[in-house]
Amino acid sequence: MKLLRVGPAGAERPAVLDEDGTPRDLSGVTAEIDGAFLGEGMDRARRALAAGDLPALEAAERIGAPIARPGKVVCIGLNYRDHAEETGAELPAEPVLFMKASNTVVGPHDDVLIPRGSVKTDYEVELAVVLGGRARYLDSPEQARGLIAGYAISNDVSEREFQLERGGTWDKGKSCETFNPFGPYLVTADEVPDPQDLALRLWVNGELRQDGSTKNMVFGIDHVIWYLSQFMVLDPGDVINTGTPAGVALGRPGEPFLRAGDVVELEIDGLGRQKQVVR
């Protein structure tokens, strides 16, 4: 299934796409696409969709993030070999972990706001993993795959001066408002046969900046979930941003950071496409 939420910000309705790409209203099945639904309610949604019981929604409505505000947004840094190389960093011996405020999550086509005083706002196309089960002290990476509800596109927008030049941890360069456009869909795990073989692309003003593959991850998705579960409990609805390939502004000649009026477009094979205007 492709799950989504449509409507004005703060008043989105849960929906699912049918085989023709028409959004169908899930309000009769669940009040929200959140951790509780992802943990227990997806079978009800599948049955209702198969039975033809879901009314159509107007396709022109705004698309919000495909899940309600997650409990956690956990991010993995330097997780692509080519991205580590372009930034001059050594490949990490263990996953690099940082957090992103959960209220950074916005719709896939919502504006991205440059923070006050920023001159180094950057983009990062990433595969996001959404948990459908609880991960706590997993015994092995093999246990992780069955806990994944689905996958989506994240733009892990970053302010590099705040992140790298102002001391402390990375979090303050990652948690500015609107810094995590998400969606358009949460594509359930059964529709993504191999999440380690997906192409990721990002354009700025029509120029292809990032063109990578999840094959190039240093630490695969199952390993990341297992690893994180040794340090924190992951709950249904939590989001993991799994890293970005080469091509970010920080690693390009002249460091072409984002400016007001820029248009950023992202896509990942099978997961849809995003488009944001920078304000």
Image: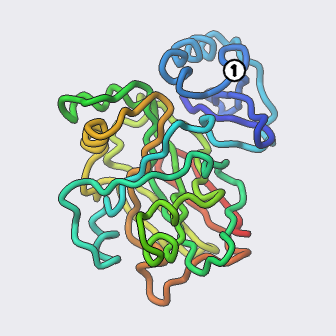
Residue drawn at x 52%, y 72% is 162
Residue drawn at x 38%, y 64% is 245
Query: In the current view of this chain or complex, which residue is farthest to the front?
Result: 168
Quadrant containing the C terminus in the rendered view: bottom right
Viewer-side residue, 175 vs 250: 175
Viewer-side residue, 28 vs 114: 114
The answer to whether residue 117 is left or right of residue 229 is: right
Residue 170 x/y as whole percent: 43, 64
Viewer-side residue, 108 vs 70: 70
To which residue does mark 1 refer?
A: 31
Query: In the current view of this chain or complex, which residue is farthest to the bottom?
Result: 254
From what the image shows, is residue 68 above or below residue 206? above
The answer to whether residue 28 is left or right of residue 39 is: right
Quadrant containing the N terminus in the rendered view: top right
Residue drawn at x 33%, y 49% is 197
From what the image shows, is residue 165 above or below residue 61? below
Residue 273 x/y as whole percent: 59, 52
From what the image shows, is residue 189 above or below residue 272? above
Q: Amino acid at mark 1?
A: Ala
Dot 1 crowding, Cα within 10 Å, few <14, some 14–19, many 20+: few
Locate residue 140: give its quadrant: top left
The answer to whether residue 112 is left or right of residue 250 is: right
Locate residue 228: give its quadrant: top left
Residue 246 x/y as whole percent: 38, 70
